[in-house]
Image (cartoon, rainbow, N blue to C red):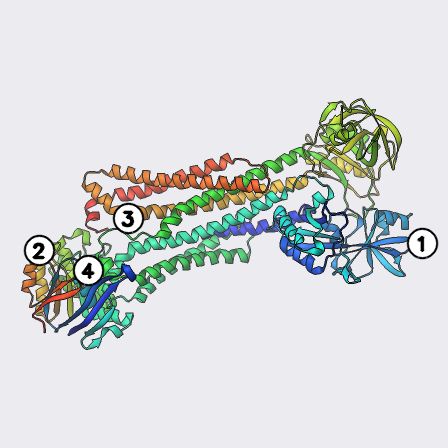
Amino acid sequence: MVGLISAVLTIRAHSDAEWQALVAATAGEDVITFRTKPSEQFFLPEWTPEHIEAVRALAGAREAFWRSGYHFAQGPGLTYVLPVVVASPGFLTARNTEFVAGRDLSEEDSGRRRLVLSEAHAQTIFPELAPHEVVGRMVWVLEEQFEVVGIVAEADAAYRATIMPVERFGFYDVQQVYLRLAEAGTLAEAVRRINAYLAGTPPLSGLEAVPYREFVRPGVVYERLDYVREISGLFTWLVAFAVLLAVVNMVNQALLAAAEKRRSWALHRVLGAGRWKLVGLELAQSVRLEGLAVVLGALFGLLLGAYLGGLVTAQAALLGVGVGLASLALGSLPLVWEVLKLYPYRALRQSHGLARHGILNLTGAFGLSLALALVVLAGGFRDLGQAVIGAEVEAIGADLVELVPDRSTILPVARPTERDLGALRQAYPAVPMTIVERHQAQLQRGERTFSADVLAADEAFIAVSGTRLASGSERADGLVLGHAVAAALFPDGDAVGKVVTLSGPRISRREVSVTAVAAPPSTERLEALQLRPDAVYAPSALIPAAALSARLYLRAADLTGADLEALSAMLSARHPNAAPFMARHTAATYQAYLDRLNEQSRQFNLAATLTFALAAVGLGTLAAARARARLYVRGLERAFGATRADIFRSELIGVVKLALLVGGLGSAVGLAALWAWTRAAAYPFVIPHGWLAAALGVALGIGLAVGVAVARRIAEQPPIAILRGEL
Amino acid sequence: MIELQEVVKRYGNGQAAVIALAGVSVTIPARSYVAVTGKSGSGKSTLLAVLGCVEAPTSGLYRFSGRSIGELEDGALSRLRARHFGFVFQAFHLLPELSALENVMLPMCYGEFPKMLWRERARQLLKQVGLADRAHHHPNQLSGGEQQRVAIARALANDPEVLLADEPTGNLDSKTREEIITLLEAQRAQGKTLVIVTHDAELAARAEARLKLSDGRIVTSEGLP
């Protein structure tokens, strides 16, 4: 038992380290931020450092980040105005801001004259320099020189860092706060708790907490990270429960052993043994054996954990040994208690039967029930998470790959061109690929207008993005409207064949016909390329102007890793003085969640096995106590003519019925808990057929194994010896 | 000498309390042969347990050889029990996993005999009860009478002054019963105090003194001061 617990703890330590890495790699997914409630027309929040700490604590967040409003500062030069935002160190990274060059502001930069410039300001101040050349330059702001340490892909601000928010005129200038959650918290639960706090805090009552992704894009489907988090939480509970079950089993075993030894103890007492002498003898015997078992078990567990890929830490080892020793100590208590409270003469005169122990009967039966309930609940959640995240990966496109510049270098970033695309297509003609440029544009039809993202790409876009068309067909001379755009511009009819006016900062006003309307996308994830409801696809020929950025996507289903490296290398070779390109799966984040879930599944299986094993011990203890209590009756039955086979059958059926009863109860409780939990959290409910079958199968298996062992033992006892009280 | 004054023994508390002895006063001189009789539940066995210092009185005074027992803590009481009292039970209570010899040696763990003498002394005692050739048999290999003889040998292990027998012949046939009574009376002849709890009127009649209990009280006392 100690071995299995140590192994689980070892693997868990490794799992925690991996979690931190995953969260760091998926910045933005675990972040909460704040926005003005839709019902509040004008609200000026008055954040203080105490408020920030309070919401951080409420969310169980690892870190809190904030930024001030704009501080308009003169410079550089006499006429140029540079808006400066004061932010906490790491703020830009927490907000998942894209860096064009350089780095984020760290604690070392706090209070120092260092700035992160927006790309637009960098271009205005240093028109002749590429962004990476601006890093390290000095900028004059209000007669003070600031060093530029990074360039972000934004239009409108510069950032500097301070540890504490800036206080002016009696209030702190904090405009935005971000919280990055710890693993233990769930996004939905943290948001709920913070919103309750905000409602009762007047300076912040006009705000509401929202997941960052929802803040960026209102209405986006809820974060999937919660599935992983909740599985993780359940896993912890399962391990804790297994430990509890182990301790209870130790106590029950001790009670059973005490019941078995009562007459022997009583005899020793009558023959002259003092209470404490007897206690000492018993403890010395059990501590020697079980202490050795604890140490060997912990050692075995650490080796097993290491073999299964766990992280062997002193903490896991000590915890394993600690749990074992605590079980030992707790398991010894009933033994000591039984010796101390023994009335020796009475115990000797009891010729048969045993005192039943409420705790033994209760925990033996319900231990198995709860173990199975927890396994069904956690297993159901795992299935649910795998189904939902798996569907998300599928919807984004498990094989959708973007060739992106490696931003870890200081080289300038190149933009893939039509020529590049042509060369890649020549090398890999069967691979669907396209370059997508994003524009902001206004669509107008009569009095109706719609501000939309326009995705300009060649005819491969529909195939590469996975966009499905609800009506019409894609043509090189017309637009494909997202269904929300179509509904807004053509509320009373089919948009296909109609004409709209298209205009934008880089798009000259023109009339274009609508050739198709896209079906709602199967996911609204930001990573997905499917045409979103409020976006429009325009063939590249219709929009000759280049956008600020262009991204090259391809479908890599038929490609190997080597092919992808070759494609990246080919594109990099075409831009020798720029940052090299590399292949990045757009669904990588979700794939990472899925991998994490699968990793947890393996740990979960080990914990579930441990729980089942402990539940089996619990049921075995109960069955043995039950059989022992009925021993006298069995002796009478044998004396009246029952055969060994009759006794064996009767005992076996009794134990199997008991196991199935508690197993069925546990499965039902687990299923009900899963249903209630998913309903409360607004997750879909999936019946975990596999886990239900496993739970009942395990209960039946335990019942049969324990039943056969106990029934054989009872059936083989000589009836006369039973009736004479010799057993 | 054993002296009880207004000894009360109560089990449990409140309404569930059972009063097994309700104010027993008796004096048993050394080397007496006393039979305790009474119906089931009258308190006979509890009296024996209290006399043998297995269970402490709830109230009242118990003096053994002039020492007040109520003042002794558990360790001292256990040592007193081990060295001065020997018990024989109706159900024998031999440990099934031990041989006859080992069962006899068992009380010596708590007595004063040096360990090197235990085995030889146990052999002598088994010889004394006529079971020298059964020393290595386990209880389930012995008849009822043989088991009771082993139990008597065990009771004599620490050479106690008082032998307490709780219905020692209750499970035995008449021939074996006679052998066991003879064995016990032989111990009396060697100067030990013998207290026997029994339902057997004939056995009670053989004793020098008789106590009759009812509802935890002594209702008749013969042959005792």
**Lower position in the chain sequence, tag 1 or tag 3:** 1
Classify residue A146 by image quadrant: bottom right
Marks 2 and 1 close (CB-CB < 8 Å): no
- Residue at 68% in and 52% down: A179
Image depth: mark 4 or mark 1 in front: 1
Q: Looking at the image, which is closer to me, B132 or A645?
A: A645
Image depth: mark 2 or mark 4 in front: 2
Which disc number belongs to residue B101? 4
Q: In the structure shown, which secondary structural element does the residue marked by tag 4 occupy?
A: helix
Q: Is residue A640 above or below residue B133?
A: above
Where's residue A305, x and y in %?
52, 49
Q: Chain of mark 2?
A: B
Q: In the structure shown, which secondary structural element does the residue marked by tag 3 occupy?
A: helix
Marks 3 and 2 close (CB-CB < 8 Å): no
Amino acid type, label 3: Ala
**Lower position in the chain sequence, tag 2 or tag 4:** 4
Discs 4, 3: same chain:
no
Whether residue B10 is visible to the viewer of this picture, yes or no, is yes
Measured in 3D between alpha carbons, the distance from the residue under mark 1 to the one under mark 3, in whole angstroms, is 96 Å
Tag 2 residue: B176
Tag 3 residue: A629
Tag 1 residue: A79
Discs 3, 2: same chain:
no
Q: Chain of mark 3?
A: A
Amino acid type, label 4: Leu
